[in-house]
Image (cartoon, rainbow, N blue to C red):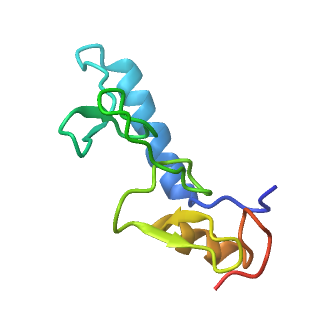
Amino acid sequence: MPEKNLISDKEKEEIRDWLLQLSVNQNQEPVLPTRPCDCGYQIYDASLKCFKCKQTWEPCIITGMPLLKNQIINCQSCGKGALKDAWNTYLQAYPTCPWCNKHAK
């Protein structure tokens, strides 16, 4: 269990304010973020599988988001992948891989 939050109090407040504004504003249509699959089909941004072409992606061991090309870094001990930004943020707070618990570089 993390001993401290990975986001600042300011970021938490911004998220809270955004959620309150979204819940109060009835004119705004809720829309989930999407991204194009390699086949061109639009899929949910966090989807690990394209339901048109069946392509799959491994999940980031920190965020659960799909590991897309040019965004991946692998643990040198266990080889599991993470998104570079999430990995670097995680390592600022914890010196070990969240998957294998070995010292990460």
Instruction: State which quadrant residue 20 falls in.
Output: top left
Above or below, comparing residue 90 to residue 29 in the picture: below
In the rendered image, residue 29, in percent from the top left (x then y), is placed at 25, 18
Residue occupying the far bottom of the picture? 105
Q: Is residue 92 left or right of residue 12?
A: right
Image quarter of the N terminus:
bottom right
Image quarter of the C terminus:
bottom right
Q: Kindly identify the residue that appears in the image at 17 percent across and 38 percent down.
A: 40
Q: Is residue 89 left or right of residue 94?
A: left
Above or below, comparing residue 56 to residue 29 in the picture: below
The tally of labels here is 0
Q: Kindly identify the residue that appears in the image at 26 percent across and 42 percent down.
A: 37
Instruction: State which quadrant residue 32 falls in.
Output: top left
Q: Kindly identify the residue that appears in the image at 43 percent across and 40 percent down.
A: 46
Above or below, comparing residue 89 to residue 11 in the picture: below
Instruction: Judge by depth and name the residue closer to the eye, 56 or 36.
Output: 56
Instruction: Judge by depth and name the residue closer to the eye, 92 or 15.
Output: 92
In the rendered image, residue 26, in percent from the top left (x then y), is placed at 29, 13
Residue occupying the far left of the picture? 40
Q: Kindly identify the residue that appears in the image at 25 percent across and 20 percent down.
A: 28
Above or below, comparing residue 29 to residue 56 in the picture: above
In the rendered image, residue 93, in percent from the top left (x then y), is placed at 68, 73
In the rendered image, residue 62, in percent from the top left (x then y), is placed at 61, 57
Instruction: State which quadrant residue 2 falls in.
Output: bottom right
